[in-house]
Image (spheres, helix red, strand yellow):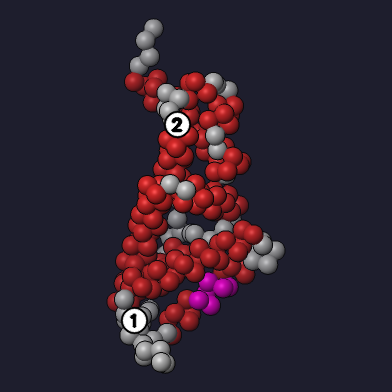
Amino acid sequence: MPRTKGDHEARRRDVSEAVWRVLAARGFGGLSLRAVAAELDATTGLLTHYFPTKRDLVKHALDLLEERSGARPRRAAEEGLPAVRAALLDILPITDAAVDGNRIWVSSWDAALADPELSGDHARRYGRSRDRLRDMVATAQRLGDLPPGDPGRVAAGAQSFVLGLAVQALFDPRAFPPRHQVELLDDYLAALACAPPAGGGPPPPS
């Protein structure tokens, strides 16, 4: 009996689930056609129908990572500074699921940086996240929760802060337990709320 489109889509979903399990267990460093085939209890020959090359597999894994990250539950918060805080908390590795997700993201950087096209795709992913944060910052500024200024600059700084904090927490979880991460974020936001306007402060001394 010939395979139907539904059969093909179901098989592709199975393959994606196997890719995700390999990522969760080994990160991008352990991602290979052989590893995914073993997870799927299939042959590497079957996988080449979906991923003719290792690069195709990595690209699919990066797309899958973005898709899973976008679909995860988000904290609810009122608009303004509470919404900015909730969005930044969603990035930090302060739950088991968030730790796993951040490990996969960090392990993806090497794979993306090794390929200009994949690196550009990753840059656009982070850019979209920054744009969403920029809109939240702009609302917080409009409501008076944050000083006026360039919301894109504030968003870039906030994204950089939480990504750096996430990496430190992954490498040294004892020094950066979840409660301490939240405290550091709240300190950062408190300073941000009292800071001079973004891009509008006095020039640095010459």
* Magenta-tinted stretch: 183-188
Specify whether residue 17 is in view: yes
Q: Residue furthest bottom?
A: 205
Q: How many marks?
A: 2
Q: Give me the C-alpha separation between circle 2 and circle 1.
A: 46 Å
Helix, strand or loop at disc 2? loop
Name the image quarter holding the C terminus.
bottom left
Residue hosting label 2 = 53
Q: Amino acid at mark 1?
A: Gly
Q: Is 186 contained in the magenta span? A: yes
Q: Please tell me which residue is depicted at 38% across the width and 69% down the height of the picture.
A: 155
Residue 171 falls in image quadrant: bottom right
Circles 2 and 1, Cβ within 8 Å, touching? The answer is: no
Residue hosting label 1 = 199
Q: Please tell me which residue is depicted at 33% across the width and 73% down the height of the picture.
A: 151
Of labels 2 and 1, earlier in sequence is 2
Q: Residue furthest top?
A: 1
Specify whether residue 72 is in view: no
Seen in the picture, residue 84 relative to 71 is either above or below; the reply is: below
Seen in the picture, residue 3 relative to 82 is either above or below; the reply is: above
On the image, the x and y values in percent for residue 42 come to: 55, 21
Q: Amino acid at mark 2?
A: Thr
Front one among 145 and 138: 138
Circle 2 packing at 10 Å, graded few (<14), some (14-19), many (20+), is few
Q: Please tell me which residue is depicted at 35% across the width and 16% down the height of the picture.
A: 4
Front one among 47 and 148: 47
On the image, the x and y values in percent for residue 107 come to: 55, 49
Q: Is 70 contained in the magenta span? A: no
On the image, the x and y values in percent for residue 81 come to: 41, 73
